[in-house]
Amino acid sequence: MRILIPSIQVPFIKGGAELMTQGLKNALIRDGHEVEIVTIPFKFSPSSYIDNLIDIWKEQDFNNFNGYKIDRVIVLQFPAFYVQHDHKILWLMHQHREVYELYDQKSATEELKQLKEKIYRYDTQELEKIEHRFSMCHNVSNRLQKYNKITSLPVYHPPANEELFYCAESYGFIFCPSRLEKLKRQDLLIKAMQYTTSEAVAIIAGEGGQREYYSSLIEELALSDKVRLIGSFSEEEKYVLYARSLAVFFAPYDEDYGYITLEAMLSSKPLITCCDSGGPLEFVVDKESGFIVEPDPRMIAQKIDWLYENQQKAKEFGENGLQNYKEKNISWDNVVRKLLGE
């Protein structure tokens, strides 16, 4: 079949959305299909820009292109899922979070309030028309049901290069790889390290808008010997850091999915996350493959110390996580079968 994947492009920012979209394209090509990703640039603000972009996507008819009939369109994200096609398949990555679970009524401008009303109305109208509806995880399906009263079937997919993750002897550090942004909450780990009593150190990897704040927080709490911000890192370094870690810390606020959770599992490492972290809660089994705690630095510190002082149990937790991953049938072959009804 000839398949198109409409998407958005945020210049100079790449993350899970791009990996998921490219991963789907590659999997469909391996299954014998002709596939293209079609993108339109996206800005997070102002609201008027997003408002106009909604209308642009709604006007796009993807049934035919220059004499080529398009057999299927698979839509993943806002506002690309407004595109028109007779055989549209939804595999929902996320909606526009600013007007859903991250919406703050008190601080919202009148312009944002109006945009929220439009998006709620358009999302419900367009998404309920799609016969075959899937999402990337239960957390995303739950949001769609909660806000739009629309059902969808969760279908998990693996992180990129899953075969390259491995486990090696721990060097006793807590690994925290992610963009340095408020929603990722690396500050919870930094603050937790002031309360640890073991010799564990934290390695926080990545770049982002919170880099300066995190640096100043480490200095303010006198934690330069216990917390290291290493910035950007290569793919090769990533696999080694996972493999040599004692455990992985990933406690974002209401994450959609979270590749880091899966990468920790593939590396046979326990994960520390929080009870409001969203996606990771679908995979971490408390006190079996990691810990689920309140977003409280003191509680996080206790779990770090426990893992450091009970490293054989930490190893068992990691092995349990890998086994859980295998039991969930997380594969691109399964994604393609589900989405195309094969």
Image (tube, grey):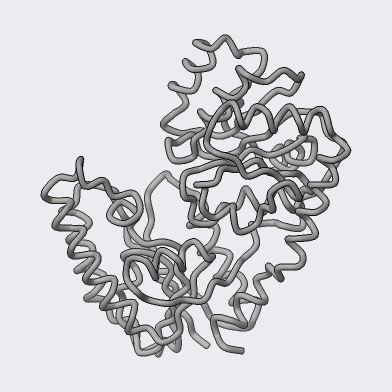
| Residue 162 percent location from the top left of the image | 72, 57
| Residue 73 percent location from the top left of the image | 42, 80
Which quarter of the figure has residue 221? top right
**Residue at 76% of width from left, 31% of height from top?**
306
| Residue 137 percent location from the top left of the image | 54, 65
Residue 4 visible in image: no
Residue 6 visible in image: yes
| Residue 319 percent location from the top left of the image | 83, 51
Which quarter of the figure has residue 144? bottom left
Side (left or right) of 41 relative to 269 = left
Q: In the rendered image of this protein, does residue 140 appear above or below residue 251?
A: below
Front one among 137 and 10: 137
Q: In the rendered image of this protein, does residue 166 appear above or below residue 246?
A: below
**Residue at 55% of width from left, 85% of height from top?**
340
**Residue at 26% of width from left, 46% of height from top?**
104
Side (left or right) of 89 relative to 194 = left
Image quarter of the C terminus: bottom right
**Residue at 58% of width from left, 29% of height from top?**
189
Q: Residue furthest left?
A: 110
* Count of picture labels: 0
Front one among 156 and 297: 297
